[in-house]
Amino acid sequence: MKLQLPVRPEWPQKQIPQGLVVQLAPEVTLFSEVCLPLPFDLQRWGDQVVMFNVPPGQLRVHAVSDAVTRAGWPVTLVKSDVLDRPGGQPQLRRIHALYRFTQYGAVAVIVGPPPRMDALEGDLLNFLAEGQPDFSTDEVIALADAFEGIAEVVVTPSAPQPTPAS
C-alpha cells in the first residue's frame, strides 16, 4: 500500500527505500513516505514526524489543521518553519500532510524557502488534498492471490500411494 499523489511525469523524481522525492518547483521538494500501520497515539506520531531531525528550539509551528482529502480521507496539515538557530530566522518552510487511511498512515512533506513556499501555498495545499491510498500490492494478502491466473492445479504424488487392504 502506498500514498498516491498527482505527481506529473515531467517533474524530476527519485524512488528511495522510504518513499519518493519529487522536485515540484525550483527550490520546492516533496518527500512522500510509504504507508505504515498507524500508531495508537496519533498526537505523538504527528509530533515525532514534524519534529524529526530538527534541533531543540529551532521549530516554529504556524498552523495545525484537520481536513479531508478530495476523496474523503482524514489528513492533518502542519505548516512550520525550521529556524537557523534557536529563536532565529526561518531557514526552511514546511507543510506536512499526515494522512490516515483506515489502519494505515502516510506522510508527505513539502519543503522550500519561506518566500517560495508562501507564493505557492495555495497550489501546494490543493496538491496535498489529492492524496489517497493505493491499495494495490504485489504481496500475497489472501490465499486466492497466490493462485491468481492459474486455471487448474494438478497434484501429482511423489511416491506410490498404498492401496487399501480388503
Image (spheres, helix red, strand yellow):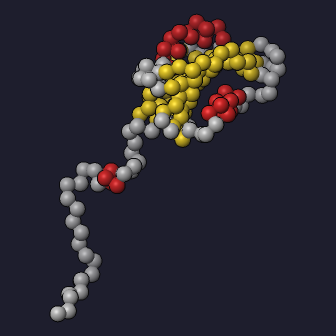
Q: Is residue 155 above or below residue 136?
A: below
In terms of image quadrants, where is residue 158? bottom left
User: Farthest residue in the bottom direction?
Assistant: 166
What residue is drawn where x is 67% and y is 34%?
44
* Residue ID at (41%, 23%): 71
Return the residue found at the far right: 86
Residue 49 left/right relative to 108: right
- Give the image location of residue 35, x and y in percent: 51, 37
Give the residue displayed 56% in from the left and 38% down from the top: 38
Res. 130 visible in picture: no
Which quadrant would the N terminus be assigned to in this image?
top left
Q: Is residue 3 visible?
A: yes
Determine the residue positioned at 70% across, 28% down.
51
Image coords of residue 86 (percent x, y): 82, 20
Q: Which of these two is toward me, 52 or 40?
A: 40
Give the side of residue 51 with respect to residue 25, left or right. Answer: right
Task: Pick whichever, 109 or 69, lies toward us.
Answer: 69
- Residue 47, image x, y percentages: 68, 30
In the image, residue 48 sits, relative to residue 147, either above or below, namely above
Q: In this view of the protein, which residue sits in the foreground, 121 or 92?
A: 121
Q: How many marks?
A: 0
Residue 114: % across, % down: 66, 11
Quarter of the figure with the C terminus? bottom left
